[in-house]
Amino acid sequence: MTQAKSVYDQEVTQGRNTNEHVLVAPHHGGDYGASFRHYSLPCNDIAISVGTNNSYRHPQKDMLRYLRSLGSVKRTDVDGDIEVRL
């Protein structure tokens, strides 16, 4: 997340619009425990790229709950292709 924070900080210092952010969930929404669930930047939309009926059961319930607390979640296994206009 260091790279994302750096980009965000640059936007703020250069006066760019920071109201719309999209987070692409890492590791298909896999969960490594509460201590790894930290995303402190504002985000409106979250995209999870994950296959239907995957054997790892991604996205995992706790991570999905956390991501939904941050913004609107779209999943490729449920919603199909996800398109974001920049």
Image (cartoon, helix red, strand yellow):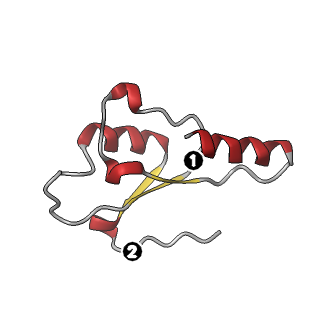
Residue 63, image x and y in percent? 33, 40
Residue at 28% across, 36% down: 62
Residue 29 vertical placement versus 62 (above, below):
below
Quadrant housing residue 1:
top right
Does residue 26 appear to the left or right of 2 in the view shown? left
Q: Given the current orientation, which residue lies at the most extreme front position?
A: 3
Q: Residue at x 86, y 48 (%)?
A: 14
How many discs appear? 2
Q: Residues within 10 Å of mark 2 (few under 14, many from 20)?
A: few
**Mark 1 neighbour density, 10 Å: few (under 14) some (14–19) many (20 or more):** some
For numbered disc 2, what is the local secondary structure?
A: loop
Residue 31: image location, x then y, percent: 30, 39
* Residue bearing mark 2: 81
Residue at 61% x, 46% y is 4
Amino acid under disc 1: Cys
Q: State the residue in front, 48 or 73.
A: 48
Q: Name the outermost residue toward the right.
A: 14
> Which of 70/63 is in front?
63
Q: Residue 43, labelled with which disc?
A: 1
Image vertical order of residue 72 relative to residue 84, above or below: above
Estimate the x, y position of residue 48 in percent, counting from the top left: 38, 57
| Type of amino acid under label 2 | Asp
Front residue (pair 10, 65): 10
